[in-house]
Image (tube, rainbow, N blue to C red):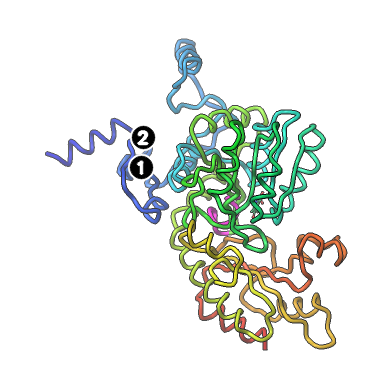
Amino acid sequence: MPIAANTKEQIGTGTRTVGTRTVGTRSVHGRLNGRIPHPNHSLTTPIVQTATYTFRNTADLCDFMEAKIFGGNGDRGEYGRYGNPTVRAVEKRIAALENGEDALLFPTGMSAITNVLLSILPAGSHVIFTDDCYRKTRQFCNTFLTRLGIETSQVPLGDYEAMATAVQPNTRLIISESPTNPYLRVADLEKITAIARSQRRIKTIIDATFATPINQNPLDFGIDLVIHSATKYLGGHNDVMGGVVVGAAGLLHALRQSQGMLGGVIDPHAAYLVERGLKTLALRVRQQNASAQAVAEFLETHPRIERVWYPGLDSHPDHETAVSQMRGFGGVVSFEVAPAPGESPLETAGRFIDAMTIPLIAPSLGGVESLIEQPALMSFYELSTEERLAIGIKNNLVRFAIGIEETADILADLEQALS
Ligand SMILES: *Cc1c(COP(=O)(O)O)cnc(C)c1O
């Protein structure tokens, strides 16, 4: 009977993957055939809550060690810092979404970024990063990396001549976000890849947190590693922190070895929550894309709004690049509120935010709840207005990270808050 034969084959090859599937289906099932049973026939990935793994006897241990030395040791566990089956299942699912060979989870997005930079960059090397990037990434480059004797160059996003000119004989890495925070600038991935390939040893990394694998797959454009803060869209519910790196198996194997030394591993329960979020990723992101586009178009024609930043608008400086390499433009819209007469830009923006009723005032983005913030007060509070302007953060700038509420309700809320 063909069904029985099929079932047997699937059970026999636990990692058998299936071919053509769109990203929406992959977000539910990954690359795996969902009929391969988990232990106890559990539909969901079991949370293997253990710090270590046992061996039946000394021969079992020796077999494992032999296999480990000569490569494939299957997927059995040795010790929690070197791997966990729940975490492994989620890694495979994210690799499938990003068209990558493998993925590696971390306890936070910053942990993923710092582990990768520390692992890839030798002393005396040089890294190029683009401006308008996540503030802690920039701080890590300028403090830790500098202290380790690693040179850094910051180039404006969108200036590929400056990027090419910044390349030195010791350059090992080009890292950028796309889209960026808070201006949603979109890096031209093919141009970055071309610059990196001008020299043999330059790796490229894109922090694609704002795009999600639903809207963009940087590996398809020749980028070496993609990073996400899984705290944002992948987890998607503002209830778990995580980070992930995706790329070729060889590079990921080396990063896994470093992770075993640096020690930053995600808890299996947190990994489970990321996987639970992934199952609805495509649905959530499509809703967020649609709402953000509607919000951006509404704000662009509103008299109380000076400027809107959203890659889905013709007016955005990177609109064409975004159209050529993204399937959707994401759920974050940034905009500048026109100061009311007799009020400072900081005050008017604050009053507008206070008048909104749906979005919560909080840092972060990518969850089911809409969140809103004034970057001048949230991430750059300690700077003066002049210092903020020097790095391009205006006092009347608002970042609106749209959730999955009804689009019409969000538009109505904006309408009432602006009047
Ligand atoms: C949030 C974020 C990070 C950091 O991730 P954590 O999970 O908070 O450590 C890195 N990059 C981008 C673009 C982010 O939005």
Q: Is there CB contact under 8 Å for labels 2 and 1?
A: yes
- Dividing the image into 4 quarters, which one contains the N terminus? top left
Asked whether mark 2 lies closer than 8 Å to ligand 1, one says no
Judge whether 377 appears above or below 110 on screen. below
Along the viewing direction, whichever of 357 and 268 lies nearer the viewer:
357
> Secondary structure beneath disc 2?
loop
Mark 1 crowd level (few <14, some 14–19, many ≥20, 10 Å Cα): many
Residue name at image x 46 percent, y 41 percent: 100
Q: Residue 32 has which mark?
A: 1
Asked whether mark 1 lies closer than 8 Å to ligand 1, one says no
Residues drawn in magenta = 229-237
On the picture, is 303 further left or further right than 319? right
Residue 337: image location, x then y, percent: 71, 78
On the picture, is 182 further left or further right than 145? left
> Secondary structure beneath disc 1?
loop
> On the image, numbered disc 2 is attached to which residue?
15
Dominant secondary structure of the residues highlighted in magenta in the image: loop
Residue 107: image location, x then y, percent: 62, 43
How many angstroms separate mark 2 from mark 1 (CA)?
7 Å
Residue name at image x 81 percent, y 88 percent: 341
Judge whether 335 appears above or below 9 on screen. below
Residue 222: image location, x then y, percent: 50, 43
Mark 2 crowd level (few <14, some 14–19, many ≥20, 10 Å Cα): few
223 is within the stretch colored magenta: no
Residue name at image x 52 percent, y 55 percent: 212
Image quadrant assignment for residue 361: bottom right
Judge whether 397 appears above or below 342 on screen. above
Q: Amino acid at mark 2?
A: Thr
